[in-house]
Image (cartoon, rainbow, N blue to C red):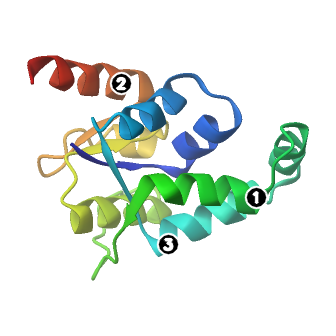
Amino acid sequence: MRAVLDTNVVISALLWGGNPLKLFELTTEGCLVLHTSPALLTELEEVLKRDHLTRRLASQQTSIEEAIRLYTALCIPVMPLSTPRAVPTEIDDDQVIACALAAGATLIVSGDSDLLVLHPWRGIHILNSVQAVRFVMSAKAER
């Protein structure tokens, strides 16, 4: 199953664990194929530079570069050819949609209500991390 994680989910996985981290684990188990794009990686780097997140990384004895390296090792990069205007309330979230379209993803995972309200969008499930773990586990059980 191809998926795109919104930056907020990636940050949660890297810094706090829980269900977002479980999505990373499902990727290493072969149940999920994560995709990202240059725009999403740029956003990830910019967000990780916020003081409170930099301090959290330091407390875990890691760096922004190492966190991004860990995440990109799990992902297949895609280069969206266009960015559709899909999220009426937040133009930056259109980058998540563009990545999902370029990847042929069937799942977007986000904690952002601006994206979640679109579920489903053009056949793409848009779920929070709890719902996404259940969804992937259900698909895994059906195999």
Residue count near mark 2 (Cα–Cα under 10 Å), binned few <14, some 14–19, many ≥20:
some
The Cα–Cα distance between marks 2 and 1, rounded to whole angstroms, is: 26 Å
Q: Which residue is at the front of the view, 100 or 89?
A: 100
Q: Which residue is mark 3?
A: 39
Residue 118 spot, x, y in % from top left:
28, 43
Q: Tell me which residue sits at (27%, 71%) in the image.
A: 84
Q: Tell me which residue sits at (34%, 71%) in the image.
A: 78
Secondary element under disc 1, as helix, strand or loop, is helix
Task: Determine whether, in the image, residue 17 is placed left or right of residue 48.
Answer: left
The circle on residue 133 is 2
Confirm or deny contact between disc 2 and disc 3 (CB under 8 A).
no
Q: Tell me which residue sits at (76%, 58%) in the image.
A: 64
Task: Determine whether, in the image, residue 93 is placed left or right of residue 102.
Answer: right
Q: Which residue is at the front of the view, 142 or 3?
A: 142
Residue count near mark 3 (Cα–Cα under 10 Å), binned few <14, some 14–19, many ≥20:
some
Residue 89 spot, x, y in % from top left:
43, 55
Task: Determine whether, in the image, residue 72 is placed left or right of residue 125.
Answer: right
Q: Which residue is at the front of the view, 112 or 26?
A: 26
**Which residue ends up furthest to the front in the rendered image?**
29
The Cα–Cα distance between marks 1 and 3, rounded to whole angstroms, is: 16 Å
Q: Quadrant of residue 100?
A: bottom left
Q: Please state which of the two labelled residues, at mark 2 or mark 3, is closer to the viewer.
A: 2
Q: Which residue is mark 1?
A: 64
Q: Quadrant of the N terminus?
A: top left
Residue 27 spot, x, y in % from top left:
38, 40
The Cα–Cα distance between marks 2 and 3, rounded to whole angstroms, is: 25 Å
The circle on residue 103 is none
Q: Quadrant of residue 79?
A: bottom left
Secondary element under disc 3, as helix, strand or loop, is helix
